[in-house]
Image (cartoon, rainbow, N blue to C red):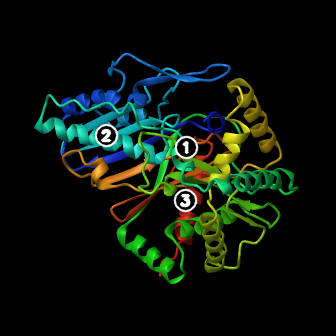
Amino acid sequence: MFWGSMQGEMIIQLEMEFSEQLNADRLARAVELALDAEPILGCRFVPHWRKPYWERMNSDNSNVFPETKTEDAFESFKVASLDAYTGPQFRVCLWNYANGARLLLKVSHYVADATGVKDVARIISSIYSRLSQDPSYHPEPNIHGSRSAWQVLKYIPKRRYAALYFRFLRNDAQINRAPERTLTLPFPEGQTESLSFLQRFLPNDFVSHIVEYGRRHKATINDLLLAAFFRALVSTAGWEGHEHLRVTSTIDLRRYIPIRQASAVANLSVWADGWPNLGTDLGQDFSSTLGKITSMTQRYKQNFGGIDTLMGVLVGLGPSPYNWAMNWVKRSYQKRREKGKWAHAFTNTGPIDPSAVTFRSKPVMARLLPPPSYPPLFALGISGYEGTLTLSTGVYSIQRDLAERFLDTMVAELPHS
């Protein structure tokens, strides 16, 4: 997260819209109880030169649940920061209007990845529903749930650990030593002012069509979106064939847990740095780009993709004192940026389960908002809900026009017929 904090705001948000108002008092109580149900949420992050730790705070939810009266106030909350060092680790904003409601859950990335944010939503929504039947309900605190990556690694054959670690070292060295720069959108470096979130909504019929296209080409939705991302990047950036075509994507390591679920709210996703990497061969058309990506992702999934990155972090930085590790991370990040090796980020957060966001009624819309990246960096998030997809990104004023053009181009690149 220290690595990430140099790139952008370490928050992930879940936005929901309802066709009826929510009970503000009951929601405030559910938020208060969630601080105890999942104790990490009621903590603050305390740095220490050797080993940082979490410190439990007083259960005061006065700053956790601001109820707004206007859309402007709701939007202002959306672009506000969340400080993991002061805590608590999440905030909730409700805007009840005449015939509906909008609800925003803002969670610190220090405690949760996108799947973890969905877990927080599930906790709050389940408490909210129980309180309607039993106003005295109090959930049992999850004090024994693990947040450790070892709950993933225990399902990986130990005989593969060394090879996966050396694969991480080899990939990292290849990126750092290669003379070619990485293609990025030509955002100017500078001001982090006037943050806003941009979205492109893909309705059910559009998504059904690209799913069918993917089925014919033996490709997943993620493969299709990555192909569109690369082709939009090339088109918008004015690529002349010199820079390498890389993207940094995320992998949820819960895929290796048989039940695909952690035992507590946690960060169990890793960045696959510079992957996929098409080199300088985009392909002549969308289908050829898609074919290249599909073959890469299939090989990666079959070879414990993401575990190599996890091993690199655990072995390379895990045993080190916190201050030393953070200084190394900072130097590494700055060196990568200076050499033009830093790729834009693509994170597919997957579908949002309606049961996780049902507050006595199901939302008509739900989407995840990725961490906003500081210029000239850029991160795109994909989330699904009820057969639809939303492309989301947080950008600052100097990025907005180019980011809008990129999103339009990416949607246009997806197969329409």
Name the residue type under label 3: Leu
User: In the rendered image, which residue does mark 2 sit on?
Assistant: 123
Of marks 3 and 1, the one in the foreground: 1
**Label 2 vs 3, first from the N-terminus:** 2
Label 2 secondary element: helix
Residue 139 visible in the displayed image: yes
Residue at 36% x, 35% y is 74
User: In the rendered image, which residue does mark 3 sit on?
Assistant: 407
Callout 3–callout 1 Cβ contact below 8 Å: no
Q: Quadrant of residue 293?
A: bottom right
Instruction: Report crowding for label 2: few under 14, some 14 to 19, many 20 or more residues within 10 A (C-alpha).
Output: many
* In-image side of 214 versus 8 (left or right): left
In three-dimensional space, the C-alpha distance between marks 2 and 1, rounded to whole angstroms, equals 23 Å
In three-dimensional space, the C-alpha distance between marks 2 and 3, rounded to whole angstroms, equals 33 Å
Name the residue type under label 1: Trp
Vertical relation: 227 (above or below) 130? below
| In-front residue for pair 249/37 | 37
Residue 344 visible in the displayed image: no
In three-dimensional space, the C-alpha distance between marks 3 and 1, rounded to whole angstroms, equals 38 Å
Residue at 49% x, 52% y is 254
Q: Residue furthest left?
A: 133
Q: Residue 246: where, in percent of width, then height?
A: 71, 59
User: In the rendered image, which residue does mark 1 sit on?
Assistant: 150
Exactly how many numbered labels are in the figure? 3
Callout 2–callout 1 Cβ contact below 8 Å: no
Label 1 secondary element: helix
Residue at 55% x, 43% y is 149
Residue at 77% x, 33% y is 328
Q: Residue 77: where, in percent of width, then height?
A: 41, 32
Q: Quadrant of residue 350?
A: bottom left
Vertical relation: 5 (above or below) 407? above
